[in-house]
Image: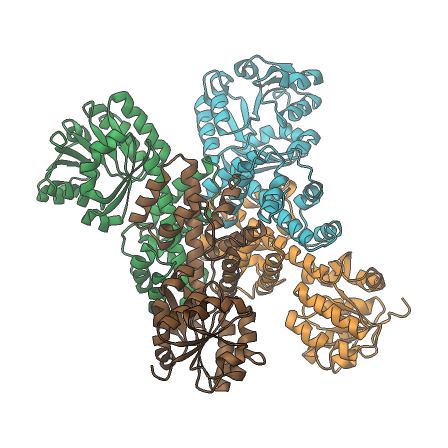
Chain colours: A green, B brown, C orange, D cyan
Amino acid sequence: MEDKRTVAFIGLGIMGRPMAANLVTAGYHVLGYSRRRESADGLVAAGGRWADSVAGAVRDADVVITMLPDSPDVQVVALGPGGVMASARPGTLYIDMTSIRPDVARQVAAAGAEHGLRCLDAPVSGGERGAIDGTLSIMVGGAAEDVAAARPVLDMLGSTVQHVGPAGAGQTVKAANQLIVAGNIALVAEALVFLQAQGVDVDAAVAVLQGGLAGSTVLARKAGPMLAGDFTPGFRIELHDKDLGIFTAAAREAGVVTLLGAILAQLTGAARAQGDGGLDHSALIRVIQRLAGQQP
Amino acid sequence: MEDKRTVAFIGLGIMGRPMAANLVTAGYHVLGYSRRRESADGLVAAGGRWADSVAGAVRDADVVITMLPDSPDVQVVALGPGGVMASARPGTLYIDMTSIRPDVARQVAAAGAEHGLRCLDAPVSGGERGAIDGTLSIMVGGAAEDVAAARPVLDMLGSTVQHVGPAGAGQTVKAANQLIVAGNIALVAEALVFLQAQGVDVDAAVAVLQGGLAGSTVLARKAGPMLAGDFTPGFRIELHDKDLGIFTAAAREAGVVTLLGAILAQLTGAARAQGDGGLDHSALIRVIQRLAGQQP
Amino acid sequence: MEDKRTVAFIGLGIMGRPMAANLVTAGYHVLGYSRRRESADGLVAAGGRWADSVAGAVRDADVVITMLPDSPDVQVVALGPGGVMASARPGTLYIDMTSIRPDVARQVAAAGAEHGLRCLDAPVSGGERGAIDGTLSIMVGGAAEDVAAARPVLDMLGSTVQHVGPAGAGQTVKAANQLIVAGNIALVAEALVFLQAQGVDVDAAVAVLQGGLAGSTVLARKAGPMLAGDFTPGFRIELHDKDLGIFTAAAREAGVVTLLGAILAQLTGAARAQGDGGLDHSALIRVIQRLAGQQP
Amino acid sequence: MEDKRTVAFIGLGIMGRPMAANLVTAGYHVLGYSRRRESADGLVAAGGRWADSVAGAVRDADVVITMLPDSPDVQVVALGPGGVMASARPGTLYIDMTSIRPDVARQVAAAGAEHGLRCLDAPVSGGERGAIDGTLSIMVGGAAEDVAAARPVLDMLGSTVQHVGPAGAGQTVKAANQLIVAGNIALVAEALVFLQAQGVDVDAAVAVLQGGLAGSTVLARKAGPMLAGDFTPGFRIELHDKDLGIFTAAAREAGVVTLLGAILAQLTGAARAQGDGGLDHSALIRVIQRLAGQQP
């Protein structure tokens, strides 16, 4: 780990901020960069440093991490002028942790190979809470030796780190993750709306459902806020909608039929169209409630 | 508990057999009845007794339990000539643990009130394994004092026993349980077919999915058998299809829109139509595979 | 036709009223009965007569026609005390034109066989306008010779009269008809909402769509009112929802997977839950609009 | 029309061939180009001429028409080196009749504005038969005066020509057309599979359905071949699947929720995955049959 001491961290949003801070705590020299200078305040307070540009951040880094909103942002930061490819030293380990399209992850990896960078796609699951607690699930695509090299850093960020295949595989698994999470939210939502309509003691019902084959992390974490109408994000529906777009497009290309995925992408699309895109993804229940004629 | 020592157990199938045996082990006098005499062999070996008829089983029982295939069976055994209502003593606690239509559960409870029986609907989740281990989740509808009286018996059968509302509420929660379970199976199936089509390391993917917000009891227990093609029931698709019929009908009556429920009922219907009704419900993945042009 | 001169017409609602009047115009002696006396005013003005009861209407009739709201109504009027079976003469031709469950139609036919009545199920398509104009499409189930005997009467009510199979077959075809009609309405609704969102000249678009493979009777008749927001029934969504319940249940029993049917039944259910059950079925577009965040 | 006498026709496939021939018949000088020389045999026999390249075809043309497989083909032919923009004279009327993404149509129109070309998007409905008979439905996007200028040519190709809005609007309407057509095919398929499973006289049923509100061009033209198992294209499922991809993506961008569209795109995807992509789109019935456990 001696040679992996300096980490450039690009993207200091809801997720990136606590992740970068955790790396400082773990003893890394962290140079942060974000579009807005003030996003780095917490990092600087924790002992990290601010870099004035992507190029400035990555130039002397051993490891570069990006945590950005979407595929085009990664294309700009990784591939654009003054970006990671153009500015990092050969041999640098570049870990993109954004959730993006698998084909863009493969495009980045191919560009990395040309520039002598070692690239991994390593999107995460677990939300803001997992980022703060360092308990994210991290799904990693890339070469085995690069995954091994990255593991000390990734272990500071997540409690489950899995190498799931070659370049792009991390994003593919993330897409599947988003299918299952959205599906669980929608199932719990349909169940709760149904149970409330029938006059059932819903708290007792959730407890017994959790104890059987219906149990899930979503049921454990989200049923309460859904019943309480607390939709502070967390993970915004508009991002989940973007992710389901990635999933359904990738499934389509692969010749995989995904009836639930297709319906779920419509439900997240409905949530956005109805003005709820900025709420936590558990607010999908509001779409189900409106379908049933309720005013949530 | 002194006055609840004799239990009549009607229905000794895959679920009823181990449940009745657990009650013997717990010290109850158990009189079993089933359509086929040989179904009682295990119970008798464990120390229970065989009754020649429903009437014979329930006549002197403190508690009557039925665990039958479907709503019409319960109507016959509970309400028919020589059935529970006709034969049990007033004051007997009658617990139907079959998964049936909520309106039939309410019909039974109303008949019980006329005959002086105390009725509960108490369907279970957890499958054969939960029945054997005594770790079922049990969702109970009925009067609070009757639930309290039944609790010692139910605690021998399940690890989670919840009173969820008045007569029929147990069945309502069970219907919601079946929605969520079927949905989770289908989501995991779509995810696995997708990941396999993309050349991902599926075992590693399942591990990382389980660690994040996508984690669920279905993913933990069923992904392995689904990947191995092991569909020994367990819980048969044709029964799950019946249960989704109950759910969608009850949702319809209640004015609750359930897009996922509707699609899931079609998928279980497809599984039956394709000849897989007798397989474990995790075999839903075969419908997804066939949709994607694979020959499972 | 000499011996088919007296027609008892039970059920004088939106559909029954003009149908009965058309039979008067065609030269039949028509005795009408309806739950409310005033429903017969138009019939009496046209030259028909009022009967005080079902029994009174059918006693001397050559042909009995029922046009009622739903399956239970037909069971009461056909099979109940003082009903058609109990009161009509053996040999009477009994044509039920209500849209009901195919199994109830078969139950009525079986009862008719016992009582010596010749029964047909002959539901219609074409709505109030078709009833007034005598241009209904009539789908007839029953024995060929009974269909032949009924044809003179049916030809006065519809422009397309087809014998589609044995008892119940008329209702089966009607169920399929309701699937296709609901589907066409929903497709046109999705298309119109899409085109409006894109700033297309929707009237020109409808014209060109109608000229190609997308053309349909629904597009021709309903797109205009949908765009104008005119949802005067016509055929009420709550009745169409009932019919889709019949279709999906019958498909389920027959082992036929019907993904579109399942979604459509959810959409009509949503329309009812949202308070639009009393509007014309073309008001399904309001569900689509609300899903897209619009306030119709 | 004197100044619109020479037409360059690029793309001589199933659709383009008869369309180009119809223009020859109508008195136009037609220069054809296609990737494969032999595709022009019919055109040459009819009196048209072969051009060795796109540039050669369009250089002296008054009107340029392209009829190609998909969006990327149009981008290459219209925008690429030696393409329409690079080679046609300023003022040339360029009509793309391919079914492509609306945003690509707008991209072409913008490029045309730079090069001084007058661009229209004018996709068609009506299939090979409509192309041969000159009875296509043509939905045209672009400036009103350019539509007016193109009308003499378009009237030789179609019986319904509608100006539906600005650049891209033709493609938008075409996308809606493909939604409705796919939906009608799937509805008819579900209805036919249902009716056959119930033992109904399906030919009689189709006749009566056609007479009522369920009537459609799809029912009239496709039910027969579907029942006969004749799936000679016509219009291939794989192209329809592409078009539904365009529709669902455009709907998503516009914030329009399209539950039926989403399911239909899965069904055409299933048809492709099951190996039926090369069959006529009416072969969607085979997906429905397989879901119901039948071996079509």
Q: Residue at x 72, y 60 (%)?
A: C170
Q: Residue at x 15, y 34 (%)?
A: A7
Nearer to us in this view, A294 or B143: B143
Nearer to us in this view, B202 or D278: B202
Q: Residue at x 36, y 53 (%)?
A: A275
In the rendered image, which quarter is residue D30 located in? top right
Establish if D254 lies above or below B161.
above
Question: Is residue D165 visible to us here?
Answer: no
Nearer to us in this view, A93 or A274: A93
- Please give left or right for residue B73 compared with residue A106 in the image: right
Question: Is residue A119 visible to us here?
Answer: yes
Residue A4 in the image: state x and y as whole percent: 14, 31
In the rendered image, which quarter is residue A161 located in? top left
Residue A14 in the image: state x and y as whole percent: 22, 46
Give the number of callouts. Answer: 0
- Please give left or right for residue B288 compared with residue D2 in the image: left
Quarter the N terminus of chain C occupies: bottom right
Residue B40 in the image: state x and y as whole percent: 49, 69
Residue A49 in the image: state x and y as whole percent: 10, 37
- Please give left or right for residue C154 compared with residue C186 in the image: right
Farthest residue, direction right: C2
Nearer to us in this view, B91 or B183: B91
